[in-house]
Image (tube, rainbow, N blue to C red):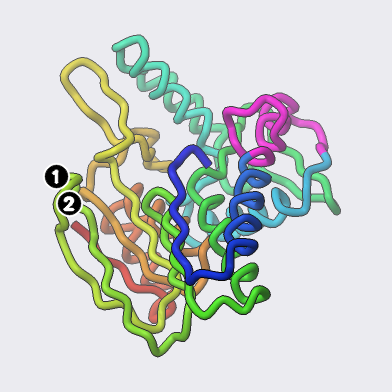
C-alpha cells in the first residue's frame, strides 16, 4: 500500500499476522496505481471499456462511489487525472494552468465510474485512484482475520490508519502526530467504542513547486491542493468509511466537514488540527 505496516498482537497468533501481511500484499497488487498489472492501472488504460476486476476492487470502487456521492464529491476516486497534473508540476517545478486543471476536472466526477456485474468502466477522460480508501479496506479485512483467529486483541498501524481490535469496552490511548513536528505528539486521545482511526494530512506527502510545499490531497471541487487544515483524524466503526472521510474533510475543509457530520452524525468522530 506504499507505506510501512506495523502489527502488534499477543504471542501465539503468528499465523494471523502472516495472513494479514499476505492479504495486504494482495490488495496492493490489485489496487496500486503504480503497478502496471493492477486492476486500477488496467481501468485507467482502458477508458470507456468494460473491464473485469477482482471482487476486492469491485467492492472498494462501489464503496468509494457511494461515499463520493454522500460527501458531495469531496471524496472522489476519479480525481487521479488532476493529481497527475500536480505531480507533474512538482517534477517540472511549474504550476499547471487553470485551463488544464478545469479540463481535467471536467471528466472527474462521482458518475465517471460505472458497474455491470463484475465489470467496471471508467469514462473517457477520467482516471481512478483508490489510495484514499484502500488502506481502510485492508483494515476491515484484518479485523475479520483477527476475529476468525480468535485473537483477543491486535493493533495495526498502516501509515496513519489504525485498527484497534479488541473488546469495545477497552480504552486505548492514542497519540496524534504533530503536523509541524512529526516526532512530537499534538494530541492524546482516549479511544473507546471505535475500532478504526484514520489521519489525513499534507505534512509527510506533498508536492513542491518553487518555494511552495503543497499537500498531496486535492480538493476535487477546485482541482487545487487542499490547504484548509494541518491534519484531520477520524474515528469510525468501518475502515473504508474512516479512511475516505478523513480524506474528504482534509480535501474540502469546513464545507466538507459540515456535509460529513450531516450524513454520518454520531457514527464518526472528527479531530482537526
Asked if marks 2 and 1 touch (Cβ < 8 Å), the reply is yes
Residue 111 screen position, x and y as percent: 63, 47
In the picture of the structure, the residue carrying the numbered disc 2 is: 178
Which residue is rendered at x = 26% and y = 31% of the image? Answer: 214
Q: Quadrant of the C terminus?
A: bottom left
Residue 196 location, quadrant? bottom left
Which residue is rendered at x = 67% and y = 30% of the image? Answer: 41
Which residue is rendered at x = 34% and y = 33% of the image? Answer: 224
41 or 229, nearer to the observer: 41
Q: Is residue 271 left or right of residue 141?
A: left
Q: Residues within 10 Å of mark 1 (few under 14, many from 20)?
A: few
In this picture, which residue range is highlighted in magenta? Answer: 29-51
When the figure is inspected, residue 173 is found, relative to residue 15, above or below; the finding is: below
In the picture of the structure, the residue carrying the numbered disc 1 is: 181
Callout 2: SS: loop
Which residue is rendered at x = 70% and y = 57% of the image? Answer: 59
237 or 9, nearer to the observer: 9
114 or 44, nearer to the observer: 44
Can you name the residue that lies furthest to the bottom here? Answer: 169
Residue 151 location, quadrant? bottom right
Q: Is residue 125 left or right of residue 210?
A: right
Can you name the residue that lies furthest to the front here? Answer: 12
Q: Is residue 212 left or right of residue 12?
A: left
Callout 1: SS: loop
Magenta stretch containing residue 31, yes or no? Answer: yes
Count of number-bearing discs:
2
Residue 239 screen position, x and y as percent: 51, 64
Query: What separation in Å lies between label 2 and label 1 (alpha carbons)?
Result: 5 Å
Magenta stretch containing residue 196, yes or no? Answer: no
96 or 103, nearer to the observer: 96
Q: Is residue 48 left or right of residue 198?
A: right
Amino acid at each position: 500500500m506504499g507505506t510501512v505496516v506495523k502489527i502488534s498482537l499477543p504471542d501465539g497468533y503468528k499465523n494471523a499476522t502472516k495472513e494479514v501481511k499476505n492479504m495486504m500484499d494482495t490488495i496492493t497488487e490489485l489496487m496500486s496505481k503504480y503497478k502496471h498489472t493492477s486492476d486500477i492501472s488496467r481501468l485507467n488504460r482502458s477508458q470507456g471499456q468494460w473491464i473485469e476486476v477482482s471482487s476486492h476492487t469491485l467492492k472498494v470502487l462501489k464503496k468509494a462511489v457511494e461515499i463520493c456521492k454522500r460527501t458531495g464529491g469531496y471524496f472522489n476516486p476519479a480525481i487521479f487525472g488532476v493529481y497527475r497534473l500536480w505531480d507533474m508540476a512538482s517534477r517540472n517545478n511549474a504550476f499547471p494552468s487553470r485551463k488544464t486543471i478545469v479540463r481535467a476536472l471536467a471528466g472527474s466526477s462521482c458518475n465517471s465510474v460505472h458497474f455491470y456485474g463484475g465489470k467496471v468502466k471508467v469514462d473517457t477522460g477520467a482516471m481512478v485512484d483508490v489510495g484514499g480508501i484502500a488502506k481502510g479496506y485492508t483494515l476491515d479485512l484484518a479485523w475479520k482475520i483477527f476475529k476468525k483467529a480468535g485473537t483477543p486483541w491486535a493493533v495495526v498501524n498502516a501509515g496513519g490508519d489504525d485498527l484497534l481490535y479488541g473488546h469495545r469496552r477497552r480504552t486505548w490511548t492514542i497519540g496524534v502526530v504533530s503536523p509541524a513536528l512529526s516526532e512530537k505528539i499534538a494530541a492524546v486521545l482516549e479511544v473507546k467504542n471505535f475500532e478504526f482511526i484514520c489521519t489525513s494530512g499534507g505534512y509527510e506527502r506533498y508536492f513542491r513547486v518553487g518555494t511552495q510545499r503543497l499537500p498531496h490531497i486535492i480538493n476535487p471541487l477546485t482541482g487545487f491542493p487542499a490547504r484548509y487544515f494541518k491534519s484531520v483524524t477520524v474515528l469510525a466503526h468501518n475502515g473504508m468509511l474512516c479512511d475516505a472521510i478523513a480524506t474528504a474533510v482534509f480535501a474540502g475543509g469546513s464545507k466538507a466537514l459540515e456535509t460529513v457530520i450531516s450524513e454520518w452524525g454520531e457514527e464518526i468522530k472528527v479531530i482537526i488540527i
